[in-house]
Amino acid sequence: MIQPVVRKYKNYNFEPVKNARKILWPFAIPYDGVTRLRNYLFDQSFFDSYSYDFPVIGIGNLSTGGTGKSPMTEYVVSLLKDTYCTATLSRGYGRDTKGYLEVTPDLQASDTGDEPLQFARKFRDVRVAVCEDRVVGISKLRDSLPQPELIVLDDVYQHRKVKPGLLILLTAFDDLFYNDFVLPAGNLRESRQGADRADCVVVTKCPQNLSIEKQQEIQKKISIYTDATVYFATINYGKPQSKTGVVRWDVFNKKQITVVTGIAKPKPFLKYLDKEYLSYTHLQFADHHNFSDDELKKLDEYPVILTTEKDFVRLNGKLNKAALFYIPITFNFHRNTEEFNRLILNFAQSNSVRE
């Protein structure tokens, strides 16, 4: 049964729920101990960790999701793909398949996971693959043609079997890792000390008007855990699109709009829609949700559906009557854009194995 969540999500108060989770702290202690021991064993080389003689860039976070890994991956890929034969490798979270799989635009999200399929459809000149074991995935990518000169790993921070040459840690402005706790008391997959492995930290989803003073305050707190350079970025939402291209906002005038989200943190997306004075009903699903036939049938009864780009990948082609639209997003830095770009480009160039 699909239960609507009435709009004005921005008025919801989740602090009581967040605070209530702190009573689970006793259960977080053994989880923290296990993850710390695992990291120690990797750091001391008791467990194998593979490095590579070509550029491998890792993107990830300490928390369970919602930091903007997909737009960050797209940003890095866009920066590199015209210079290097580039590939992306993900786990393929939420897919029904197992093992190594090369992702092509004609596949379904249930085969590949939504984000890899989004990459494959957006970057036709980039090789996209999924594999739970990143070591195996990297090996298979490099053993096939065209051989990628550079690989971008999506959501790889806790996959310690691979040691990227450049590791980018993301943390969301409204859920900074230094304010959080390990599971289940909080949302961290490992302790805050894990930030020390990062080569740079990007604070994502920042307000457009984030002051220099606030940036310095956050940077100071992050520096307790890592010496890595800290950058600040925001998510920019674009104009609505359908499968045929960009549409005007007035296409939604006097329409019954249903907003469908299956992402970890829909609040910023809904805030953006509120700023556009859009009247809608919100249907919220779990992150990476695979829609059942029954759910798709019910969704098809709504005349107009507006969703995220990631959800569009899972819904496109599966609705017969409902008009389906999505809002694309882009990644933009507050300042030091050129510095971040140079970091990526210089790493790629200095580690390239071209003759």
Image (tube, grey):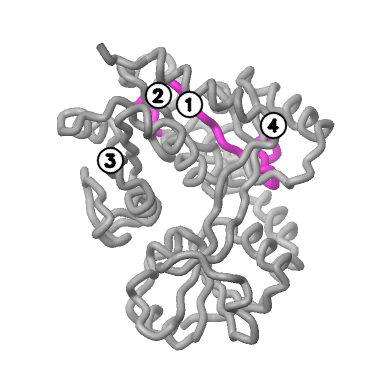
Which element type, helix, strand or loop, lies under badge 4? Answer: loop
Kind of residue at disc 3: Arg
Q: Taking 174 as reference, is 263 left or right?
A: left
- Circle 4 residue: 335
Is residue 92 found left or right of 330 in the rendered image? left
Q: Amino acid at mark 4?
A: Arg
Q: Give the extent of the magenta segment.
A: 159-179
How far apart marks 2 and 4 lie (CA) works out to 25 Å
**Circle on res. 127:** 3
Q: Magenta includes 23?
A: no
Residue 176 magenta = yes
In the picture of the structure, the residue carrying the numbered disc 1 is 167
Residue in the image at 44% along x and 38% along y: 78
Q: Position of residue 125 (x, y in %)?
A: 30, 42
Extreme residue in the right direction: 213
In this view, the mark in front (1 or 3) = 3
| Disc with the residue nearer the chain's start (1 vs 4) | 1
